[in-house]
Amino acid sequence: MRLAEIRDLLDATVIVGEDKLDIDVRTAFGADLMSDVLAFARSGGLLITGLSTPQAVRTAYALDIAAILVCRGKFLSDKFIEIARELNIPVLWTPYIMFEVCGRLYQEGMTACTRLASDVEDKHIA
Amino acid sequence: MPNDEYLEGIFYIQGRDFVDAGAVSSEIKKNLKEKGIPESIIRKVAVITFEAEVNIISYADQGTIQLFVEPDAIIIAADDIGQGIPDIDLALQEGYSTADDSIREMGFGAGMGLANIKKSSDIFEINSEPGGGVHLKCTINIKEK
Amino acid sequence: MTLERLVEELGLKCKCCWEKLKTTEVKGGYAGDLLSDVMANSQAGNVWVTRQVHMNIVAVASLKDLAGIIIVQGANPEKETIDKAGREGIPIMVSELPEFELVGRIYQLLGKG
């Protein structure tokens, strides 16, 4: 799905990346714990999270995640937005809870982007 | 300070004792359920006591939560001995947290605690001084029947 | 939909309170690992999907009257967590699936689509 479609589906606001709404994402990873994201997520997908701290942006950057969707209507600090801009990562913001967000995106055909626990190695995918 | 006549319980909380986090809140919930307090009020109390309890455990040496049940209101007083909060406005900001990694990995420390307590209270009073612990007094009005 | 049906449809492994599966109705779901968010936003009857495995999840589920907890991505609930959940009457279930996929399936099963 393109980020623009995701925005419309979830009544989202584009916080960073107005010029990047044509980016297409096929996979998604939902988590609040960034250690999980680092351990299991693959690059190129959408990170769905309720964690509204700059840590989420840095984690997305480390994994070359395509975009971040912050859910639960969390307040985003100036610092968060500044870092996302600096690292060039689109950020969408939705008032819906993660359950609803993942549910709807799954129905639209997005799939999970994960390495299975049994496959996890030390090096992360570039 | 609320009238002692309405004091329902004083609960002691040990700092850094994460194993029992939520135990006091559960006690208080049971107490209020037995009294027939409306569900909607109990939900607010649950949020307030849980967050207050976790804050004491996360940041203080020790503390207490007192529950007062008055005819028109429930009052929760949380008091602790510990590092206190240097900047209350900052601490109230959603997402601001001084939690360390171990606390975050457990799912605490998202920086929402005080903000959530304030949202759930009809009257929210907080004071603190660095090194002087934190004192919260939260009032929830019970609507008249 | 009962928890029992959810367990069957999703191939979940139940770790305790099996007797509650038949009788517990699931009313919606909540996904997340930040306990403050669960406390603030979840609703009674929700099934909670999370990666957290420590004992405190039981207190939260109990305080919010959640239907049960499903732990994802093959994470293992700690023994103390299962023991406490058993005492509190909160079913704990485990799935090998990642959160996004499991939530997607639950969402469909609950007929939200």
Image: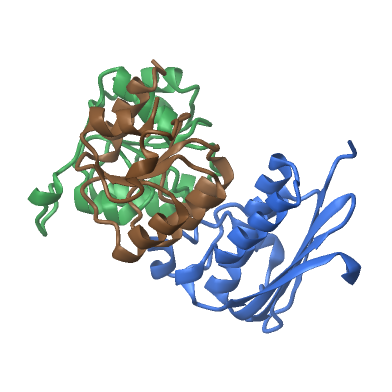
Q: Position of residue A125 (x, y in %)?
A: 12, 47
Q: Is residue B126 above or below residue A75?
A: below
Give the percent coordinates (x, y) of residue B114.
65, 58
Q: Is residue B14 left or right of residue C17?
A: right
- Quadrant where the N terminus of chain C lies? top left
Choose top left, top right, bottom left or bottom right for residue B65: bottom right
Q: Where is residue A106 drawn, in percent x and y? A: 30, 24
For this view, does A104 lie left or right of residue B33? left
Can you see residue A99? Answer: yes
Question: Color of chain A here?
Answer: green
- When asked about the image quadrant of residue C82, the answer is bottom left
User: What residue is at 37 percent from the left and 46 percent from the top?
Assistant: C91
Query: Quadrant location of residue C77?
Result: bottom left
Q: Residue at x 24, y 27 (%)?
A: C9
Left or right: where A30 falls relative to B131: left
Give percent across and percent down for residue A55: 39, 55
Shade of chain C as shown in the rendered figure: brown
Q: Nearer the viewer, residue A122 or C101?
A: C101
What shade does chain B have? blue
**Quarter occupied by the C terminus of chain C:** top left
Judging from the image, the colouring scheme is by chain
Q: Quick one: C64 or C40, which is closer to the camera?
A: C64
